[in-house]
Image: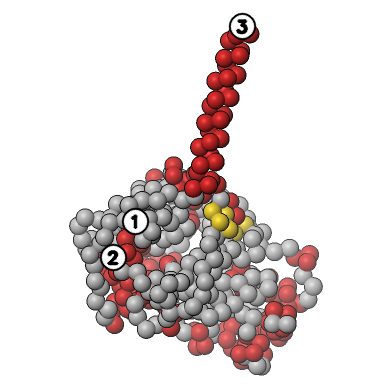
Amino acid sequence: MKKFLKYLLIAVGGIILILGSVALYINMSGLPTYDTPKIDLKVEVTPQRVERGRKIANMLCRNCHQNPITKQLTGNLMVDLPKEFGDIHSRNITQHPTKGIGSWTDGEIAYLLRTGIRRNGRYAPPYMIKLPRVPDEDIYSIIAYLRSDDPTVKAADVDNIEPKESFLTKILCRVVFKPFEYPQQKIAVPDTNNKYEYGKYLSNDLLGCYECHSADFKTMDDHFPEKSEGYFGGGNAMVDYNQRIIYTSNITPDKATGIGNWTEADFIRTMRTGFNPQGKPLRYPMLTEADLTDNDLSALYAFIKTVPAINHQVPTSVLFDAASDKTEGQKIFHKYSCQSCHGESGAGFANLTQANIKYPTNDILKDVIQHPKNYLGESTKMLTWAGVIKDEEFEPLCNYVRELGKKYNK
């Protein structure tokens, strides 16, 4: 018996040693690397492609790569990424030849977008958008935009801050998440008149709606989205710019806990205005999408109505501590969830720390809040607050915004 226990302990110790050695190797070696074949591709930059690429980039790239102050795609700290994935900074993707992607070939950009493999062979984790099934024309449009004279991609001499991936991320990238195959055949543009197919393309392939609205990033299936746990049933625990948990909404056709009672008009209005049928504002990271047409939104709605209904009551997200509110302006700032996008300091995804300088009077600042498209452009993701925020609330709210700017710029 003693001899058996001795051998058993030796065997267990050996297994522990092997597992520890594997874990140490993975942690030290970082993300996996793969071969990067040369892709012979040269994209013609046309105004039509640049405009289409700009719209796609607004929806897919801007949230992570855009500096909130300069508006250039020079990279940013991904504070809304759960900390379990590590301390992650997105990269400079401007036309700078060494710090950006100015020296990348069109084929190298296309290969990254399709497979998730950078030109140095390093795999880009799941928080990097991957587009294995989108039409070739949309890939060309993104590349055309990145090659354009748009100020957001103009060469910017900004250093990259190397990400610090967690051990969990490194394990997932070796065991669960794998690169996609580069398509061997051209992928055609889907029929926009077939609402189901077009909506499925927008949801699963281009916009990746299922990624956030399924149960958990760790259990989503990029290769077969429909197999993702809790497909469109929500509850994925994300974080906003204040590191508070935001649970994604259930958008299945379930009438009790999803959007089964929404009409197509309700859906389009919500995506356009940022307010649901109950008058509640969307919460970051969910934003309005001005770059989607009514036909796009109609197709999205048609597809989502066909996914299996899941009865799942998503937990309530606690966005602030009302007891900490010190002024009337701060109470109003929280009442309308302004901190979800702007952050508690004002320097969030939508940076408002210069608002007190750019808009010198409260009347102007009030008009910006009420009618943001008039000042920030049609593609702005800021909600239109006219008719929502009470007139008497604007003075203390504007004063609070100015306080945030003054504190930030001391």
Q: What x and y, as percent, mark residue 231?
A: 44, 49
Relative depth, front residue between 22 and 48:
22
| Sequence-earlier tag: 1 or 3 | 3
Relative depth, front residue between 359 and 136:
136
Residue under pointer 2: 107
**Image: 305 above or below 43:** above
| Sequence-earlier tag: 3 or 2 | 3
Residue lying at 59% horizontally and 63% vertically, measured from the top left: 79
- Amino acid type shown at disc 1: Thr
Residue 220 visible to the viewer: no
Report whether 192 appears left or right of 372: left
Indicate the secondary structure of the residue bearing disc 3: loop
Hey, which quadrant is residue 89 in on the image? bottom right
For label 2, the crowd category at 10 Å Cα-Cα, with few meaning under 14, some 14 to 19 and many 20 or more, is some
Residue under pointer 1: 115
- Amino acid type shown at disc 2: Gly
Q: What x and y, as percent, mark residue 64?
A: 50, 67
Mark 1 vs mark 2: in front:
2
Residue furthest out toward the top: 1
Residue lying at 60% horizontally and 19% vertically, measured from the top left: 9
